Amino acid sequence: MAKKEKYDVIVVGAGPGGITCAALLAKRGLDVLVLDKNERVGGKQMTVSFKGYKGERWPTGGLPVKGGAWLEAFRALGIEHKFRPVVRDIGQIYRRSGGEWMRSVTQMDPYVLPDPNINFDWWGLNAKEREFALQVLGEIALMPPERINALDDTTVKEYLKQFEGVPPRLYGYFAMLTHAWNVGLVDLVPMSEVVKAFQRLMGQPLGYPKGGYGRMSEDFAQVVKDCGSEVKTRTRVERILIEDGQAAGVITRDAVYRAPIVVSNAGLQPTVLKLVGEQYFDKGYVGYVKSLLPSNGFTGAHWVLSEPVLDCGLYQVWSDDAWWDMDRQDEVKKGKMPADPIITLLVPTNYDPEMGPPGKQLLIFGTPCSPNPQDRTIEALWKKTDQQMMEIFPEIVPVIESKGPYTGPLHVAVQSRDQVLPAQGGEACGLCVTIGQCGKYKPSAKSPIPGLFYVGFDAGSTAFMGSQQAVDSGLKVAPMVYHYHLEKRQWASF
């Protein structure tokens, strides 16, 4: 059989956004080719196997069970029965500056709202401060959409500082959430992003998908195949073809594949600056693309315990001394480690025992870091995070069977987006989590080149965070591409 080389649409990259878009287009009857450089689909959330375990390279938790882009995509593809999140309680661990670590457990029960007084007790708030904190939390929880959108121009820091007498620990709490949800800094991330996540996650059970996040992307890839389209892994795209000013296909090491529409899930900057080339764009647009800032990176490790010790599925660890702003980030760049790194800890074997051998436990944990793949502070952060893990969880120390592999921004650049600019490429989410670049300022999914679209976290969505935003981009970009396809057909018929 001759090798097929012409398609309706080519999707470059099979991260959550790319594979969602591809599956939706294939389901609409388009002939789609998906190309990905990795062995498996899933992008940053690809399932990896090691030492008899399965999981992601980084702790990825907090999948909304009753709503969100993942569930919407499963429904749109007619495979909602495969959306199988598992719910476990979430642990919170906190300490005041110089104090002892305090633990609590948040029940993942839709009928039981988290009790804010637990945090207020931790923070040592007096009656007046508690009343103030409840006022701020209430305003955020009930904020209408138009007010949220208006906060695209106000950072988290600016929003909180407008209130007189903000308890420092309430400020620190939102700084921690800015790290956890947006992988950004309190003095750069717009308050609108935090409010969207706060409202979406408030009072909703959070889980982890059976089989891991990569399994969900694999479910979407199967839809592509079932609809008669193709998914080719281990196939790196070296160039996106532009002919007569329009997208015309892609070049890989071994073949040329042609299509009048190319959708790139390879990252906005790698697409423009490397896969297409600056010469095909207006200089002003190239300058704009280069100005887009990355989210912070994420770095951490995998530990195997010889027996199960921890009970919750996910743990969030922070302290008064843990969160970063620009000043603290600059100190880390100079080699001064934070007193207490913020740690997100996922225990995937608590959600799905089939992720590892019976009777053992896998821990995947990490902390925010620079997105620079060449950052020399990464190993120091690994060491600091390891020390803190053993301090917080002394019960696990006697049963640590193995440590590693360790991961960081270099692994992101290898597995996900190629580095094309200095100090970038290892961003945990993608581009545009800072003020003036997200919300209503998010880059358009339509490139200036006809037939070339972007999909994924970088463009096309204003949803609330992480992979949810990437999948939502796929949901929104697919109709845009389909309508463009119909327009091309209409012109061809004249």
Image: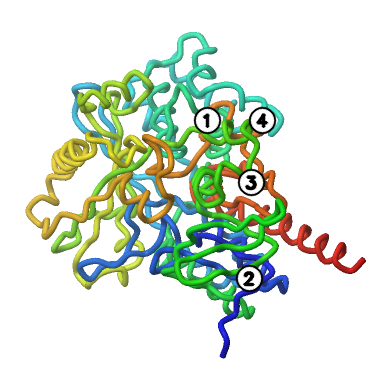
Instruction: Pick out the residue farthest to the left.
Output: 398
- Which circle's residue, 2 or 4, is located before the other in the chain? 2
Q: Earlier in the sequence, mark 2 or mark 1?
A: 2
| Earlier residue among tags 3 and 4 | 4
**Label placed on residue 149:** 4
Element class at badge 1: helix
| Sooner in the amino-acid sequence: mark 2 or mark 3 | 2
Residue at image point 66% right, 46% down:
447
Q: Position of residue 349 (x, y in %)?
A: 29, 63
Kind of residue at badge 2? Val
* Three-letter code for the amino acid on which mark 3 is drawn: Gly
Asked if disc 2 and disc 4 are in contact, CB closer than 8 Å, the reply is no
Q: Relative to 233, does residue 319 appear above or below in the rendering?
A: above
Asked which secondary structure carries label 4, the reply is helix
What separation in Å lies between label 3 and label 1 (alpha carbons)?
18 Å
In front: mark 2 or mark 3? Answer: 2
- Observer-nearest of 16 and 216: 16
Of circles 2 and 4, the one toward us is: 2
Q: Which quadrant of the view contains residue 483?
A: bottom right
Q: Quadrant of the N terminus?
A: bottom right
Q: Amino acid at mark 1?
A: Ser
Name the image quarter holding residue 178: top left
Give the residue displayed 27% in from the left and 26% down from the top: 333
Q: CA distance from mark 2 to mark 1?
A: 32 Å
Contact (Cβ within 8 Å) of mark 3 with mark 1:
no
Q: CA distance from mark 4 to mark 1?
A: 23 Å
- Measure the alpha-carbon separation of dots 3 and 4: 16 Å
What residue sits right under mark 1 in the picture? Answer: 291
Label 3: state its secondary structure: loop
Disc 2 crowd, CA 10 A, few/some/many (<14, 14-19, 20+): many
| Residue marked by disc 2 | 32
